[in-house]
Image (tube, rainbow, N blue to C red):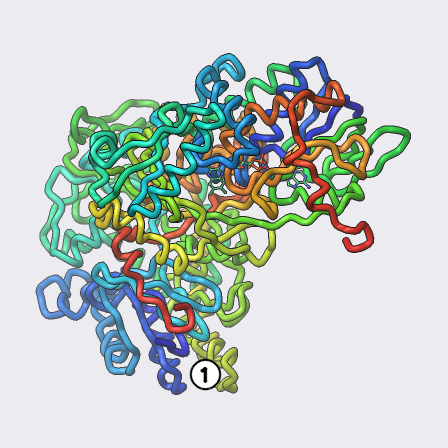
């Protein structure tokens, strides 16, 4: 089966691109592992908008339903609960739909696979009872899951504030929020305030969250160090040091968040060029104005192109659609392009401010800390292997097994690169990243063996 | 920088030659373009197999087999080697007939490393293999090792023996002046009267730079690793007439390969997995081990290596470039040979000759006209 375009991901970027491509008369297949469209931000929006969750999740959530409806009606071949486990140049997209593997061929591919939370190891992070804010929010949106107390949040960035706000609106419980961002960042961030004011609505929203949280009586802890999760079998306490004094509070659930980073496994595995974002310490694929990677015909839109949030994702989806049509031989509607670019510029206005306010955390990672959870490799072991050989994560992977587990280094990759850079005294971005070894998502032997091949490959 | 010998390539063959040359008192440097073990030696299935070897390779292979059992003596570490045995099964009578002919031929020449076993014995040896088989050839002293532990052990031993190691150091040119090679690299020039070409998939490139163009092919065999399996398969399994190599690692994961070919990445410098080819190659696995259906694949890869016309390696002095020793073309089965080939190459480097018969590995058979390159 051949389509003009295969889109991976039915979040804001993927949906916006599909709608635009269909309007241009191109055939589109959209694969997404979730049961319904919406992506991370609008997960379950069609179902939840009919329930009491809707009010608590906020208007920014509820408005997603309009785009979902347009997407459903746009005539794209939408495949829910479908994992993309490999993309090969030429273009072949390998699908796994309920254990049945097949290949879709396309003239162009758009990766709209979004972002993942930045994994930052700290003491106790592997204890049961510690999870990410993002994971808790997924459970909230897909099953109405409410955290059971005492509940603590730890980290930095807008998401913990948004999540706390949503839980409060549902009458739930949050005992405290530990803000791990450095107070010094605030001065840095202020420099970017004038530009950020172009999107004053978002800033006002953030300020309102802060006010409401303060008013709610939640304990707000700031300017602290050495935050730890404690417990024998599972989490019982969270501890930190404040003004030189050790502090301790009982906790049944500790939700952490240190920002989000683009998911780059697919573009890395295809050998696309990437650039290092030094402030946020992540790799993002190098893209032209249309979102095309250095591999012709492969496009990226949404947070996978660099963290920008939902409105930037929609605009980038639209631009990518125009760029794809252009690559496939169509003329570009200049007015449309200008409109998407204006939307994108406005959506990115607050980004320098937010990036300066919440840079990637820097503290030294203790040797005893578990960095690779899949293969249980500590920071000390990684440092030792890094010292022994060339400054290459693949060398460290071979020597320690870090990054060889089922998560494919999604949890430990950046930490390993950072430890290597520290040991060799080079810049973090220069240590590179693990070679990505397919499949991008695990698939069973049986499913691979029964792979349905496109005709020309048989 | 002047040395007695310079080794090009930090795979296991380069490391083994460097180590054993240094032990003979030579001042040795080794240069590796990437990091040690980046290519075939890190991608290998690490099967330690005398089973089914070409008779021309058997003397070196049997010598290596002895060393694998006492690897600590060579490198101070067992290299994760377990003598779990290797089994080559016959799925039908025709395949069994071929195995029988081979084993009887070996016995006629006084070699007893391979034994024939029947279906019942095979069942008790590998109870987890539930597919139908009529019998097998079996080498109880064979087994498998851990490639990364092996690379580390050879590296540590080579450093201790005084080998100077340079990673991320690519050879870009070779010239001969007054009985000495001048080797230019991305990290400066090296001088040595003897150069050992152990550059794996890029050995033809090195030979060409030295004025000895050779005809070499490329292999890019693929491997699959699954999640940990609950059943236990002790020996390494292959099947007569089929592309299969199947074994369980110490970690419990399954390692499945057998020479199914991937593709060359368009940078020409690495190999990529071809899932369509991989899918078609899983038939034997499903027949012999139907319970693997539900296991998840966590990783796959393809490794690059040079291959020759008859799949026998090239080992020995170049016929046309003085002081150049070739050590490559292992065609997908060079891991087991690492200790013995390193011994021979070190001997050549130090003494200029060896008692070992290398006629089957002479580069003459793959030489190209000089102007044709
Ligand atoms: C998937 C796979 C499975 C295998 N399974 C088995 C098995 O089960 N049993 C078995 O016996 N064998 C097996 N083999 C074969 C075995 O792994 C190889 O024969 C052996 O590792 C070859 O080692 P090498 O040192 O010759 O090559 P390599 O390990 O490839 O080393 C060559 C090195 O040379 C370097 N180099 C190249 N050009 C330059 C340059 N210009 N300057 C500096 N350095 C350079 C490369 O970077 C490379 O590191 C397998 C091979 C593969 C790929």
Label 1 beta carbon less than 8 Å to ligand 1: no
Q: Quadrant of residue A177?
A: top left
The residue drawn where x is 48% and y is 80% is A337
Nearest the eye: B231 or A276: B231
Q: Nearer the viewer, residue B66 or A393?
A: B66
Can you tell me which quadrant of the image ligand 1 is in?
top right
| Near-viewer residue (B43 or A325) | B43
* Location of the N terminus of chain B (image quadrant): top right
Estimate the x, y position of residue A404 in percent, counting from the top left.
38, 39
Using residue A314 as the reference point, say whether residue B270 is left or right of it: right
Q: Does A380 sit above or below residue A410?
A: above
Is disc 1 placed on a helix, strand or loop? helix
Instruction: Report the residue that reaches farthest toward the front.
Output: B108
Query: The residue marked by circle 1 belongs to what chain?
Result: A
What residue do we see at 58% from left, 39% from top? Answer: B312
Percent x, y of residue B285: 30, 47
Residue A233 vertical position relative to residue A421 in the rendered view, above or below = above
């Amino acid at each position: 089966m051949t389509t003009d375009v295969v889109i991976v991901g039915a979040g804001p970027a993927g949906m916006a691109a599909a709608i635009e491509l269909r309007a241009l008369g191109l055939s589109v297949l959209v694969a997404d592992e979730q049961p319904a469209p919406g992506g991370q931000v609008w997960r379950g929006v069609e179902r939840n908008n009919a329930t009491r969750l809707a009010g608590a999740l906020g208007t920014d959530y509820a408005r997603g339903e309009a785009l979902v409806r347009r997407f459903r009606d746009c005539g794209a071949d939408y495949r829910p609960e479908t994992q993309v486990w490999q993309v090969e140049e030429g273009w072949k997209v390998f699908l796994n739909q309920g254990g049945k593997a097949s290949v879709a061929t396309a003239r162009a591919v758009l990766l709209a696979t979004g972002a993942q939370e930045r994994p930052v190891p700290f003491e106790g992070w592997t204890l049961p009872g510690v999870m990410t804010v993002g994971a808790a929010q997924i459970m909230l949106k897909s099953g109405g899951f409410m955290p059971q107390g005492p509940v603590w949040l730890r980290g930095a960035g807008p998401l913990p504030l948004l999540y706390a706000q949503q839980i409060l609106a549902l009458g739930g419980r949050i005992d405290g929020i530990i803000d791990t961002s450095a107070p010094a960042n605030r001065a840095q961030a202020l420099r970017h305030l004038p530009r950020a004011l172009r999107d004053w609505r978002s800033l006002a929203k953030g300020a309102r969250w802060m006010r409401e949280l303060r008013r709610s009586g939640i304990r707000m802890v700031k300017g602290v160090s050495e935050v730890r999760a404690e417990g024998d079998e599972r989490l019982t306490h969270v501890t930190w040091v404040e003004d030189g004094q050790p502090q301790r509070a009982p906790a049944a659930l500790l939700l952490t968040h240190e920002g989000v980073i683009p998911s780059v496994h697919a573009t890395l595995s295809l050998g696309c060029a990437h650039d290092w974002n030094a402030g946020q310490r992540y790799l993002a694929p190098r893209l032209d104005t249309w979102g095309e990677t250095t591999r012709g015909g492969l496009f990226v839109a949404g947070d996978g192109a660099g963290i920008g949030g939902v409105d930037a994702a929609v605009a980038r989806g639209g631009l990518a659609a125009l760029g794809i049509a252009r690559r496939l031989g169509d003329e570009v509607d200049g007015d449309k392009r200008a409109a998407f670019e204006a939307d994108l510029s406005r959506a990115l206005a607050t980004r320098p401010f937010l990036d300066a306010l919440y840079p990637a955390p820097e503290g030294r990672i203790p040797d005893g800390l578990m960095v690779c959870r899949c293969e249980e490799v500590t920071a000390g072991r990684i440092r030792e292997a890094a010292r022994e050989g060339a400054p290459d994560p693949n060398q460290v992977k071979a020597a320690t097994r870090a990054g060889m587990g089922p998560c494919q280094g999604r949890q430990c990759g950046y930490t390993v690169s950072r430890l290597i850079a520290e040991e060799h005294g080079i810049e973090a971005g220069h240590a590179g990243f693990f070679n990505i070894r397919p499949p991008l998502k695990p698939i069973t032997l049986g499913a691979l063996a029964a792979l349905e091949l496109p005709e020309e490959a048989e | 920088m002047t040395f007695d010998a310079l080794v090009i390539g930090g795979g296991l063959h380069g490391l083994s030659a460097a180590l054993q040359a240094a032990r003979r008192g030579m001042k040795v440097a080794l240069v590796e373009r990437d990091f040690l073990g980046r290519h075939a030696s890190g991608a290998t299935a690490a099967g330690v197999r005398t089973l089914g070897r070409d008779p021309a390779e058997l003397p070196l292979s049997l010598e290596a087999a002895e060393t694998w059992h006492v690897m600590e003596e060579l490198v101070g570490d067992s290299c994760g080697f377990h003598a779990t045995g290797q089994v080559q099964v016959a799925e039908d009578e025709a395949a069994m007939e071929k195995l029988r002919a081979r084993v009887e031929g070996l016995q006629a020449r006084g070699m007893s490393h391979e034994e024939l076993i029947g279906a019942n014995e095979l069942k008790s040896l590998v109870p987890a293999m539930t597919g139908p088989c009529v019998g097998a050839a079996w080498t109880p002293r064979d087994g498998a090792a851990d490639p990364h532990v092996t690379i580390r052990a050879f590296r540590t031993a080579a450093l201790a023996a005084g080998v100077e190691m340079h990673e991320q150091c690519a050879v870009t040119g070779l010239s001969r002046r007054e009985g000495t090679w001048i080797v230019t690299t991305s990290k400066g020039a090296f001088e040595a009267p003897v150069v050992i070409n152990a550059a794996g998939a890029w050995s033809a490139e090195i030979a060409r730079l030295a004025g000895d163009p050779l005809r070499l092919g490329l292999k890019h065999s693929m491997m699959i690793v699954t999640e940990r399996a609950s059943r236990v398969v002790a020996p390494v399994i292959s099947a007569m007439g089929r592309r299969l190599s199947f074994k369980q690692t110490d970690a419990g994961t399954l390692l499945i390969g057998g020479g199914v070919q991937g593709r060359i990445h368009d940078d020409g410098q690495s190999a990529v997995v071809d899932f369509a080819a991989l899918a078609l190659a899983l038939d034997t696995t499903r027949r012999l081990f139907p319970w693997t259906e539900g296991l998840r694949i966590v990783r796959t890869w393809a490794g690059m290596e040079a291959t020759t016309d008859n799949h026998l390696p090239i080992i020995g002095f170049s016929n046309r470039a003085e002081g150049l020793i070739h050590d490559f073309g292992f065609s997908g089965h060079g891991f087991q040979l690492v200790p013995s080939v390193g011994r021979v190459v070190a001997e050549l480097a130090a003494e200029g000759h060896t008692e070992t018969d290398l006629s089957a590995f002479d580069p003459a058979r793959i030489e190209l006209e000089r102007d044709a390159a």
